[in-house]
Image (cartoon, rainbow, N blue to C red):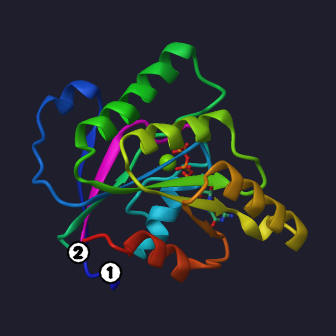
């Protein structure tokens, strides 16, 4: 898939904005994960852009659903983190509601959700909860084990084995946003059967 154009379309800042869908239905791919797993940075890498998607060295940055139109054909959506330890329970619930309401509202258009994990951290209950939520809606997931440049071969093999057990039957891609390792594999997994 050649990236010909990417446009920022809008930010959905609260669930109340989802009572109608102001954007034209197109196939969507959403990106989710705990805070600071480099969701926004991976989107920039896919878009071949350095700064279109806002990133921050301060964890907990992305708080809205940010929609981008790719090749005038697909929406790629940077969703907020579903887990960040350093926030109040009410803030966490508010963000959780944006993610789950967004996915539940647009589910018919969502072709895939890319769940990004830090390969050094075993899948947490929050990752698994998201996976089951998607399974109930019959939305396929692509599991990305990011930051693999930090792992030894044996650690990587173990991380893959555990991910396979936890996210059975889903596509798993090992990746490094830092080195670009397996970028092609990531694109193949995302764009496979998207139309
Ligand atoms: N060294 C290095 N740093 C990176 C890379 N990718 C992301 N970062 C840094 O990691 C930090 C977090 O990246 P983000 O992409 O904002 O992470 P996120 O998962 O979107 O985080 P939230 O929006 O908080 O959920 C930023 O300071 C990035 O600049 C990379 O490939 N190499
Ligand atoms: Mg982000």
In depth, the one of 144 and 140 nearer the eye is: 140
Q: Is 151 on the left or on the right of 160, as rendered?
A: right
Q: Is 12 on the left or on the right of 40, as rendered?
A: left
Q: Is residue 51 above or below residue 188?
A: above
Relative image position of residue 172 (x, y in whole percent): 60, 65
Q: Quadrant of residue 127?
A: top right
Query: In this rendering, does residue 50 appear at all?
Result: no
State how many labels appear. 2
Q: Is residue 75 above or below residue 186?
A: above
Say the numbered circle drawn on residue 3: 1
Q: Is residue 22 above or below residue 172?
A: above
Relative image position of residue 13 (x, y in whole percent): 30, 33
Say the numbered circle drawn on residue 71: 2
The residue under the point 61% across, 77% down is 180
The residue under the point 54% across, 60% down is 170
Question: At numbered mark 1, what does the secondary structure look like: helix, strand or loop?
Answer: loop
The residue under the point 66% across, 28% down is 85
The reply to whether discs 1 and 2 touch (Cβ–Cβ < 8 Å) is yes
Disc on the earlier residue, 1 or 2: 1
In depth, the one of 57 and 165 nearer the eye is: 165
Q: Which stretch is magenta?
A: 59-70
Query: In this rendering, does residue 132 appear at all?
Result: yes
The residue under the point 45% across, 66% down is 44
In depth, the one of 195 and 29 nearer the eye is: 195
């Amino acid at each position: 898939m050649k990236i010909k154009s990417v446009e920022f379309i809008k930010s959905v800042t609260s669930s109340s904005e989802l009572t109608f869908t102001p954007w034209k239905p197109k196939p969507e791919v959403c990106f989710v994960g705990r805070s600071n797993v480099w969701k926004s940075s991976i989107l920039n890498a896919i878009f071949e852009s350095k700064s279109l998607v806002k990133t921050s060295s301060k964890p907990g940055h992305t708080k809205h659903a940010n929609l981008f139109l790719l090749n005038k054909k697909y929406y790629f959506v940077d969703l907020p983190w579903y887990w960040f330890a350093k926030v109040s329970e009410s803030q966490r619930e508010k963000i959780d509601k944006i993610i789950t309401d967004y996915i539940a509202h647009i589910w018919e258009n969502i072709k895939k959700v890319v769940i990004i994990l830090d390969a050094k951290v075993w899948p947490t209950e929050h990752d698994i909860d998201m996976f089951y939520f998607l399974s109930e809606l019959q939305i396929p997931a692509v599991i990305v084990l990011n930051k693999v440049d930090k792992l030894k071969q044996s650690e990587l093999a173990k991380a893959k084995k555990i991910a396979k057990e936890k996210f059975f039957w889903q596509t798993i891609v090992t990746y490094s946003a830092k080195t670009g390792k397996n970028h092609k594999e990531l694109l193949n997994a995302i764009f496979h059967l998207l139309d």
